[in-house]
Image (cartoon, grey):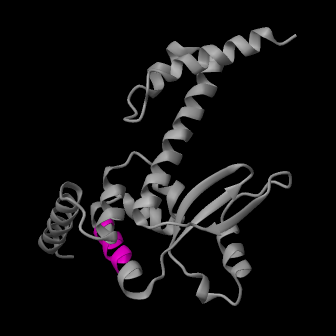
Amino acid sequence: MNIDKMIEDFEKAKNLVLSKKNQEPKDDTDILFHWILNTECNPYATFQSDIAVQCERVESLKDLYHNIHHALEDDGELTLVNFLHGREVKPMAIFDAPNNYQTFEEFENKILENHPKHPAIKTGVELFEGDIKDFVKKAEEYHVNSIKRCYLMDGARFGAKEANKHYKDYGCFDPEWEKDIKSINRVKRSKP
């Protein structure tokens, strides 16, 4: 083992990641990677787990950048989809392509095999309509709505004060959400 080489590789990866985090994105690869580096969104909500795990270490993030570039610029094997789960629509980036399968249904089944199924909830996959900027915007909206939904559930259960303590550190937190908790509690009290 050559520790000096490991440190040198780490420094190179760190410099790449920091430069991409702080610079204005120039192309689709930069847009998606810049978002990954700057969002609070859980990568496991947006990517399949073998890709999301690459967000856990600096050296892996460097590899993820190159994987994104290769998928977007070279072979087109990054597919933007909407994962449908009941009424919920979650944007996801899948490192695979429908043209690798005989039918879109095979592609859809491959994606769905990694997601829990519930017999009463319809699940499916559809292609995302839009570009990388649209995808990033929708993924961020999905994240904010998920945080708000959790905040409201916790607020209705434990009170706004407790929910505020837990969620105030999220960058997307909006103190105005507390009004929705009060509305929920009024509805709960008015039910017979």
Q: Quadrant of residue 18?
A: bottom left
Residue farthest front in this picture: 130
User: For the image shown, how many numbered marks are present on the structure?
Assistant: 0
Q: Nearer the viewer, residue 13 or 120?
A: 120
Q: Main secondary structure of the magenta part?
A: helix
The answer to whether 143 is drawn above or below residue 129 in the figure is above
Q: Residue at x 65, y 87 (%)?
A: 101
Tell whether position 141 is magenta: no
Q: Quadrant of residue 146?
A: top right
The answer to whether 66 is drawn above or below residue 146 in the figure is below
Q: Residue at x 50, y 63 (%)?
A: 47
Q: Tell me where residue 55 appears, x and y as whole percent.
A: 38, 60
Position of residue 26 in the picture relative to residue 119 (left or right)? left
Position of residue 59 in the picture relative to residue 162 (left or right)? left
Q: Residue at x 70, y 90 (%)?
A: 102
Position of residue 4 in the picture relative to residue 37 (left or right)? left
Query: Which span is picked out in magenta?
Result: 61-69
Q: Tell me where residue 31 appears, x and y as whole percent.
A: 32, 63
The answer to whether 144 is drawn above or below residue 4 in the figure is above
Asked whether residue 143 appears in the rendered view, the answer is yes
Q: Residue at x 39, y 78 (%)?
A: 72
Q: Nearer the viewer, residue 126 or 120?
A: 126
Q: Tell me where residue 161 appears, x and y as whole percent.
A: 50, 13
Which image quarter holds the C terminus? Answer: top right
Which image quarter holds the N terminus? Answer: bottom left
Q: Tell me where residue 35 appears, x and y as whole percent.
A: 35, 56
Tell whether position 67 is magenta: yes
The answer to whether 138 is drawn above or below residue 102 in the figure is above
Asked whether residue 42 appears in the rendered view, the answer is no
